[in-house]
Image (cartoon, rainbow, N blue to C red):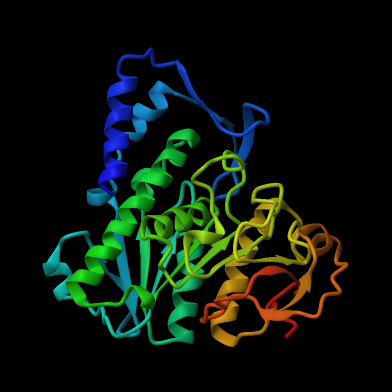
Amino acid sequence: MLRVLAVVCFGISAVTALPADSIIRKRDDGLRYQYVQDADGSPHLVDLWGTAKDLSEAARYNPTTENIYHLFTRANPSVSQPLLHGNVNLLANSNFDPNKKTVILVHGWRTNVTGLLGSVMIPALLQGGDVNVIGLDWSAGASTINYITAMANTAASGAGVAAFISWLSSATGASLGSYHIIGHSLGGQQVGIIGRNLGGQLPYITSLDPTLAGWITNPDSFDSTDALYTEVIHTNAGVMGLLLPAGDVDFYPNGGVVMTGCSGNYCSHDRGIYYMAESVVSGGFTGRECSTHVTAISGECDLPGAIQMGGWEAKTGVSGIYRVDTNAYPPFSQG
């Protein structure tokens, strides 16, 4: 964490000597300007070449003080108990139980804890298990219309969340092995950064269609080593989400590009949230092993392996690429 802060401080001091429009970073090798959809499905033409001004704007975001962690349990399933990093009074008066599994949800760009990820996953998780659910609200860093700044804030927030988990565990005695982190879109990239800052020792990270634009050659992009078991569910691969495998296990439902029952990219990009929610309530979603992501997309999967997509338990020690075929409408699982 200190290393991250040192790098950030050096970057801030360095860019103050540069003109605000100086190009200091080029993300990926493709087009400089690309369309990226926000959480409401609105397309924005974004510049993937970062300037000194972008970094200066990102430096104003402080995840330690601005991230809010909303705790939900079966004792308070609909009204959260906000937690703040370092505030022992809020923690002591909350329903957090260190003896139970803790699931942390990480939303994406230009949304917050009340967005689709939280509204779908929180009730599903509490229905499926007696757990602590923490909905991270990092909208102070995610709400900016400047996509490059939001990307920088994704990394800063990831380090901040890792520090919060370390503090929470120290303050309550909760084991690092009790955490499961789930993120969608830009949050699907952030969950990897969180795990990396914890030395890859979290037991289970799920990334739901992690964002593609600006992350193909990004060193902060999701990686299989970010946790003891990492799982990626690709639902709009190559369009809004990463195309190539990135986890220990990568699922390509319905081929991973266009979801059955969806007519557009926005619907497909979000559909993994519903699959994950259904998996923690009723299970299902048996994946067929594929030799490559290409055969997963085409449906030509003939390897003998089969595992369940999503769910409560990490499939530690398992790796590979799997295809899952779903129904067009709930229940999505075909078993």
Task: Please count the marks in the image.
Answer: 0
Residue 325 visible at all: no
* In-front residue for pair 41/149: 149
User: Going 37% across and 82% down the picture, which residue do you hit?
Assistant: 131
Lateral position of residue 270 relative to residue 227, left or right: right
31 vs 110: above or below: above
Front residue of 120/162: it is 162
Look at 64% across and 56% down and name the residue there.
Answer: 269
Residue 184 coordinates in the image, percent (x, y): 53, 58
- The answer to whether 1 appears left or right of 19 in the picture is left
Q: Nearer the viewer, residue 162 or 131?
A: 162
- Horizontal side of 79 relative to 200 (left or right) equals left
Whether residue 140 can be seen here: yes
The percent coordinates of residue 223 (x first, y second) are: 55, 55
Q: Position of residue 27 (x, y in %)?
A: 56, 32
Q: Residue 254 location in percent, x, y?
A: 78, 66
Q: Quadrant of the C terminus?
A: bottom right
Residue 176, image quadrant = bottom left
Residue at the location (64% across, 70% down)?
Answer: 319
